[in-house]
Image (spheres, rainbow, N blue to C red):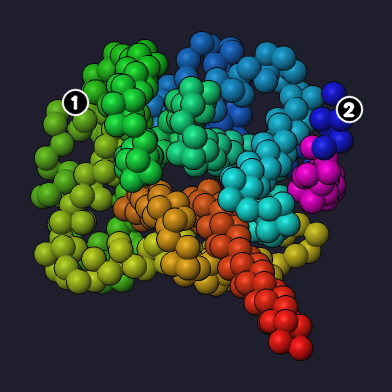
Amino acid sequence: MKSKLKNYVKDNYPILILLFVLLIIHILALKSLGVNYNINSDDIGYINSGLRLIERGTITMHGVISAQIMPGMTFFIALISLIFGKGLLFMGALKVLWMIMGLLTVYTVYRSIRLYTNKWISIIPCLFFLSLDYVWMNNLILTETPFILIFALLVYHTLKIAKEPNKKDYILIVIYYIIGVFIRPNIAIYPIFLFLYLLIKKYDFKLLMRQCLIAGGVLIVVLIPWIYRNYKLFDKFFIFTYGVGNPLLLGTYQGYGYPSDSELDYNTNVYDVFDEKMAYYLDNYDPDDYMSRYYVSVKDEMLAKYRMREWWKKDKWSMIKSYLYHKPKSMLVSPFYWYTVFNVSQRTLLIFRIVEFILFLICSCLFFLEKVKFKEWLFLMFTYGSQLAVYAYTFAFSRYAISLYFIRYIVIGIGLGILFNKIKGRSKNESINDNSSIQRRRKHS
């Protein structure tokens, strides 16, 4: 046991040092911000949702019964409350757990890169987790911290199973995917790219189809209670949430060339087409009534789709460019950092992020030097791009962007590993050639 631990430390001590440094930074940030620190936004909504599940046995958000969010955070926070109560100890436990999840994400990214290169190369991209927007984010009880961890674990076990198919990684992929869906449903499209990646990696097709069917069956069984609950409450069938309305509407005001409110006829095209039930709840709006809140979201979605139709009619090019270029571009380097930690400005973090993005682009080019790993690049880029596209379709936001940066770190790590192998291989060949030359000279002399 001691020998195994000693070997593990010897083989991984760079990441262990980094994790220790990050732990100290997180502890200092927690001390500086305080255990009860919050931004009085969704973070308080999630905490109250967990507490009300215990009190009332219902899943709520912002005080009312809701399907605006998936219930994963609600159940998790409720479980923590059952153990630690509802006071300062409860909040402290949440903050510590979020801190641990943040550190585990760093380690998971490191392990993903270690599948392809040595410990010294693998540690380099992980240094970007020193950016204080991660530290600040891990002090907020939002979905980002657990979601990034689950997403990183999914990617790690996907890369691992592609190298060597095995039952353990398959089971973990299914578990993490289901947890991910119950935290943030945009992860739902992930299996498409997992499937395609395993196909191009020559994964056994019959085994892959069998595993997909089993995983799909498990997912349906797990989702049925949630779907049934939503249908019973809202008389509508939706698999995940109804929360897309407001982000979708906000997203129609991003980019350029979108129609102004003054040039649109909302009354004729939106308000006058409400059905009787919807009109009643909106005319008699009660913020404490869950159906009123639901129909506000439906209204926002109708407004968004009307705006999108009119935008398309008015200026197709500006809409295409906004959704495929401007909105994704805004999420490439933006830090999620609304409050300074240790007096470090957002501008400093922006420079940090720009350096990382440039390195990511350079390392992406390095995959062409070793085309054996090009399939990994395709998988990582399509996974990253698909999530960017999902967010760009609704509302491009730094809070969403930060949940995807870790994929770029893996690309950087594998790319640097490719460069290292090329340099090492060239040095080795030069050494062999030099030795051969010396031997030839001795022979002739």
Name which of mark 1 and mark 2 comes first in the sequence.
Answer: 2
Distance CA(mark 1)–CA(mark 2): 68 Å
Indicate the amino acid at tag 1: Lys
Disc 1 element? helix
> Magenta region's main secondary structure?
helix
Tell me the quadrant of the picture where the N terminus can be found: top right
Residue 273 image position (x, y, % from top left): 11, 40
Name the side, left or right, on which 298 lies relative to 341: left
Q: Quadrant of residue 85?
A: top right
Q: Give the residue pinned by disc 2.
A: 2
Residue 292 vs residue 124, the one in the foreground: 124
Query: What span is colored magenta in the figure?
Result: 8-32
Residue at figure coordinates x 71%, y 87% from the top left: 444
Q: Give the residue pinned by disc 1.
A: 277
Indicate the amino acid at tag 2: Lys
For discs 1 and 2, the disc positioned in front in the rendered view:
2
The magenta stretch spans residue 14: yes
Name the side, left or right, on which 419 lies relative to 445: left
- Residue 180 circle label: none
